[in-house]
């Protein structure tokens, strides 16, 4: 097993630095949440986490990027393009914050295709505990 570190804190300083340097100009970049590489197969896996706020009318099991495609398609098309360039698997993960009404609802969406009209996904509804188990298995394959 290769040496790595445990996640201990969020690093939003890079985001804040880029925001400051752009001085209010629009960005040409997108942020994504996680990229990892399977040690055995060499395959990249990209995770993008999509928070469902408690005040929204949808929950993690019912929300999907196609519902708000007109507002955010550039982000998802860029993620899809990057995943194709890297021959990576792209997972979108709907979740709610711990301690909220829908905290146990997680939707994992494996992206199959995307174009200007929308995104096609294979979906898996799960619980927080089940997702944690699967996520740790994916992580272990990349150590």
Image (cartoon, rainbow, N blue to C red):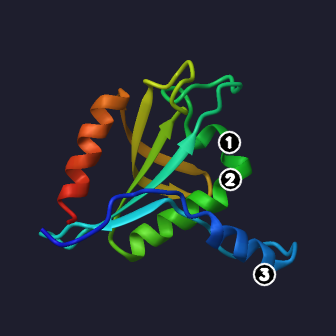
Residue 127: image quadrant is top left
Disc 3, SS: helix
Residue receiving disc 3 = 21
Residue receiving disc 1 = 68
Left or right of residue 2, residue 89 in this image: right
Q: Report the Cα–Cα distance between label 2 and label 3.
A: 23 Å
Say whether disc 2 or disc 3 marks the residue closer to the N-terminus.
3
Where residue 87 sits in the image (x, y, percent)? 32, 71
Q: Residue at 53% of width from left, 24% of height from top?
A: 99
Where residue 60 sits in the image (x, y, percent)? 52, 30
Where residue 19 sits in the image (x, y, percent)? 76, 72
Label 2–label 3 contact, CB within 8 A: no
Marking on residue 72 = 2
* Label 2 environment density (alpha carbons within 10 Å; few <14, some 14–19, many ≥20): few
- Position of residue 58 relative to residue 77, above or below, is above
Residue 123: image quadrant is top left
Between 17 and 113, the one lying in front of the other is 17
Q: Residue at 50% of width from left, 38% of height from top?
A: 94
Judge depth for marks 2 and 3 and give the one in front: 3
Say whether disc 3 or disc 1 marks the residue closer to the N-terminus.
3
* Label 3 environment density (alpha carbons within 10 Å; few <14, some 14–19, many ≥20): few
Between 22 and 42, the one lying in front of the other is 22
Label 2–label 1 contact, CB within 8 A: yes
Disc 2, SS: helix
Left or right of residue 77, residue 86 in this image: left
């Amino acid at each position: 097993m290769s040496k790595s570190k445990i996640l201990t804190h969020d690093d939003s300083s890079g985001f804040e630095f880029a925001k400051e340097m752009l001085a209010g100009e629009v960005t040409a970049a997108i942020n994504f949440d996680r990229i990892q590489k399977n040690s055995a197969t060499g395959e990249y896996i990209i995770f993008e986490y999509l928070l469902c706020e408690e005040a929204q009318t949808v929950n993690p099991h019912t929300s999907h990027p196609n519902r708000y495609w007109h507002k955010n398609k550039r982000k998802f098309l860029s993620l899809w393009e990057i995943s194709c360039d890297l021959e990576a698997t792209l997972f979108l993960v709907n979740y709610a914050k711990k301690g909220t009404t829908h905290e146990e609802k997680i939707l994992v969406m494996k992206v199959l295709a995307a174009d200007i009209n929308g995104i096609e996904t294979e979906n898996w509804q799960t619980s927080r505990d089940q997702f944690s188990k699967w996520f740790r298995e994916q992580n272990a394959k990349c150590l």
